[in-house]
Amino acid sequence: MFILGFHHPQRYKELPGRMYFHGNKIRISKARLSMNPLRKLRRIKDFFTLLIRHFINDRCFESAGALAYTSLLSLVPLMAVSFTLLSAFPVFAEFTDKILDFIVNTFVPANRGIVESHLRNFVEKASALTLPGLIGLLITALLSMATIEGTFNAIWKINRRRNLMDAFIVYWAILTLGPLLVGVSLAITSYVASLSFFSDAARSLGEIGALLKLLPFLSAALAFTLLYATVPYQRVPIRHAIVGGIVAAGLFELAKKGFVLFITHFLTYEVIYGALATLPIFLIWIYLFWSIVLFGAEFTYCLGGLVRGSTTDPSDRGPEVVESVKFVDAKYRPEKSRHFPEGE
């Protein structure tokens, strides 16, 4: 909430967030207030309190369950449509297997061989469908993305939706550009790795190996950033989306390692379900994945309040409007009404 300043800016030192009247325009000082460490810690605590409250009030765990169920129905259509579009480019046709390996290694923490085998079989069968079947797959994929957009819009407190044409353009861009960007990155990586001087440098420098180990994290951060920046039907500052993407990617990498440790040492699904153990394990992971995605979305949304210098709800602009009206009213109120009480 802005602190209103009724003093002339040339006579008094500007304070952070103070509103001044400059000619016929309202100007807001953007000087930053130096906070002591205690106040910084209090603001951080208030921010995470707001974040957790929003995550619970928006019922993100329930939404993650709904999105996990939707993902089971739409995972194969999404991948089939994406790989079909990617295979239309001959230069990327040879990278489809590498892209699938990259996706599985990045987003599937356990039983990767079984999951990859099933996905490969599903995609191959889906690519052999007739035109009506492909249209059905495309509709299923687009409806699934509309469900994701609706969940994000609920987090950003947006009541309106994209019109049909805008939604189709955005969803189509994600379906086409997503695998295309992965294909381009893999093609560049393969080309650079094939260069002799790079191979010699890779053997002599350990930093390159460490950088390659960071590739899954960087890829996940980029994917989350694009998701937070493009899916909500509202302009999201790119710096907020980047921070939210990095936070979500960090949680995602920790969750992968923790999930592998959990199912390796503590989980007994394989003893109970046998060969079918992959299904409940995969379901649990998809649910955990969407919980992390929605937490990152809430983090991105709440950053708006932190940047404005407030740890209240970023969508609540009521107090600012009231204070602004009071300021303008005090500025333009007739002199008589300023010096005499009401009713005189």
Image (tube, rainbow, N blue to C red):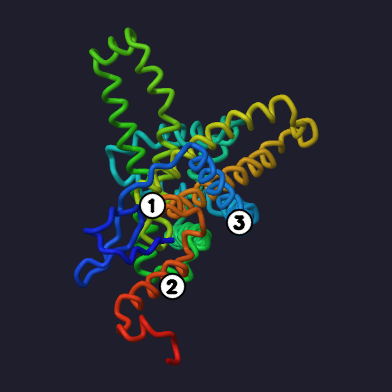
Going from N to C along the chain, the mark reached first, 1 or 3, is: 3
Q: Can residue 261 be seen in this view?
A: yes
Q: Against 106, is 19 above or below?
A: below
Question: Which mark's residue is nearer the viewer, 1 or 2?
Answer: 2
Looking at the image, which residue sits at the far left?
23
Residue under label 1, please give it.
Answer: 229
Q: Is residue 133 visible?
A: no
Residue under label 2, please give it.
Answer: 322
Q: Is residue 251 left or right of residue 325?
A: right
Question: Which mark's residue is nearer the viewer, 3 or 2?
Answer: 2
Going from N to C along the chain, the mark reached first, 3 or 2, is: 3
Where disc 2 sits, the SS reads helix
Q: Against 225, is 73 above or below?
A: below
Q: Residue 110's spot in the image, x, y percent?
A: 61, 31
- Pick the quarter of the image with the C terminus: bottom left
Where disc 3 sits, the SS reads helix
Q: Residue 222's spot in the image, x, y percent?
A: 39, 40
Where disc 1 sits, the SS reads helix
Residue under label 3, please give it.
Answer: 63
The answer to which of 343 and 322 lies nearer the viewer is 343
- CA distance for labels 3 and 2: 34 Å
The image shows a total of numbered marks equal to 3
- CA distance for labels 1 and 2: 30 Å
Q: Residue 254's spot in the image, x, y percent?
A: 56, 32
Give the class, few, some or many, for how many residues have Cα within 10 Å of label 1's Cα (few <14, many ≥20): many
Looking at the image, which residue sits at the far top?
204
- CA distance for labels 1 and 3: 20 Å
Which residue is depicted at the point 61% across and 56% down? Answer: 63
User: Callout 3, which amino acid?
Assistant: Ser
Q: Against 65, is 196 above or below?
A: above
Which residue is depicted at the point 65% across and 56% down? Answer: 62
